[in-house]
Image (tube, rainbow, N blue to C red):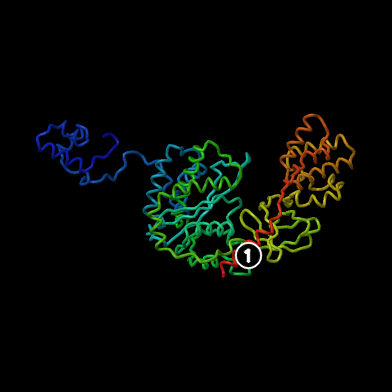
Amino acid sequence: MPGHRITDRQVRRYMDERRQGATQAVAAARSGMSERSARRFDANSILPSQRPQRHWRTRIDPLEAVWESEIVPMLMQHPHLRATTILEELRRANGDIYDERVLRTLQRRVSQWRAIHGPERDLIFRQEHPPGWQALSDFTDADVLEVTIAGAPFPHILYHFWLAFSGWQYVKAIQGGESFTALTEGCQEALWQIGAAPKTHRTDRLSAAYRNLADEDDASRGYKAFCAHYGIEPTRNNAGVSHENGSVEAAHGRLKTTLREALDLRGSRDFEDVGAYQRFLAEVTGRRNARRRAELALELAAMTPLPKFKTTDFTIVSAMVTRSGTMSVRDVYYTVPTRLVGHRLKVHVYDDRLICYLGAAEVLQLERVRHSRRRDRRVVIDYRHIIHALVKKPQAFRRWVHREALYPRTAYRRAWEALDACLDERRACRVYVGLLHLAATYACEARLADWLDGVIERGDCPDLEAARLAMAPAAITAPAVSVAAPDARAYDRLISFRSEIAA
């Protein structure tokens, strides 16, 4: 056929057909060649592989003037140069003599030079994956999924755990970057989900995670101690060689394609909260894992049992609660209940939360917030923590540096603007702070916001006493219970009956 070389097999087929009496046209059609080529083989039956190769050019070499003098020296000094870069250099040095029409010729010549004179290249050595031998962990960017939480963009990455033999996997959404906490927390959750530990655990370099541990004095907090707790041998890629982690690297693309299609079928990429999104990830991966039950059974038979207890998968920091009711954790200020002012807390830093301890007692859990890249430190204010102190000093609200954080919903901002417009400064502050105190006391933030919206829509000014009446819990009336006194003579009859039985 035009554009395709005729093979020895085609020629032999053609000769066989001719010997069996087929005409030239029929034999050529059956062997997949033209009649013109068939006539050539009838005249000379030498197989294509036996013909002498042509060693001369059929047209002028467009690179003859510069190949040996300019291109070869460049390749010898920098073998990695692309043909497009070499062509640009030729055009810079020689003007526009060499245009884009010589690019394909240059690419073929450069490829041939590298094959004959270039440096030795790395190879990929395909590995066997015995059951229960290796698990792999890696992180992958998830921006292509375009997930939103409550309508807001949700920038995150995915932690991906993968068993090399069975292909069982575990996925978790990580809001921060690649860190020691994210790695160990995700890996530990995966191990306890399958109920056993593999012989080895492979990661890429994970420089962020190991750099985070550079200043740790206690070796038990390190990645090696984590693996030792589960009897796992930790292994890592060579720097810059991603294919050494190829089993999980290749699975990233398939995973994100599956998640993208599952989101399309779901009809929405928006989730109520991070927990709902994590449940979606668990559901999708659970369906994929269900198809690997037989392979996973072989894995589990070869894996080692888990220890009785989990190990540390968090980082511990110490934080002092200031007179402002705040503590600093990883360059972010958090408010805490005022009763903790002056105490030093031990904070367990997880990927998505902070658990605070005073001595051995857990006193607080907070959602973890990431540090902004701006120079100013980020401050996370929860009005419930400070409102009981602010209600004693309501005038501090007006010029407090973090006043914007005391509008938990749009309705509260509108309420403050209405109060500031219709009342004097001191009374406006007292009423608004009282409304916040009411929301915190009765845990009615959403209900109070709806009430405030209604008041403002009517053109009225919010009133604290009216809000208290509207938000006050319904009075509970205890039912009247009448208990009649028992007849004492019944006890006399019971005692006499027991005495008769004993006799």
Residue in view at x 78 percent, y 51 percent: 386
Viewer-nearest residue: 88 or 497? 497
Q: Residue furthest top?
A: 458
What residue lies at 78% left-to-right and 36% top-to-bottom? 414
Of residues 503 and 357, the one drawn nearer to the viewer in this rendering? 503
Quadrant assignment for the N terminus: top left
- 146 in relation to 168, above or below: above
Q: Can you tell which quarter of the image residue 448 is in?
A: top right
Horizontal arrangement in the rendering, residue 302 relative to residue 435 (left or right): left
Q: Closer to the camera, 80 or 460?
A: 460
Q: Position of residue 273 (x, y in %)?
A: 61, 45
Residue type for callout 1: Ile
Quadrant of the rendering where the C terminus is positioned: bottom right
Q: Which residue is mark 1?
A: 495
Give left or right: position of 24 versus 245. left
Up-down: is 160 above or below 495?
above
Give the crowd class for mark 1: few <14, some 14-19, many >=20 residues within 10 Å. few
Q: Is residue 100 left or right of residue 441?
A: left
Q: Position of residue 90 (x, y in %)?
A: 48, 44
Q: Is residue 456 left or right of residue 296?
A: right
Percent of width and height locating residue 248: 46, 53
Q: What is the secondary structure assignment of the residue under circle 1?
A: helix
* Residue 209 position by quadrant: bottom right
Q: Residue 212 placed where, x, y %?
A: 61, 61
| Image point (83%, 40%), residue name | 465
Q: How many marks can you see?
A: 1
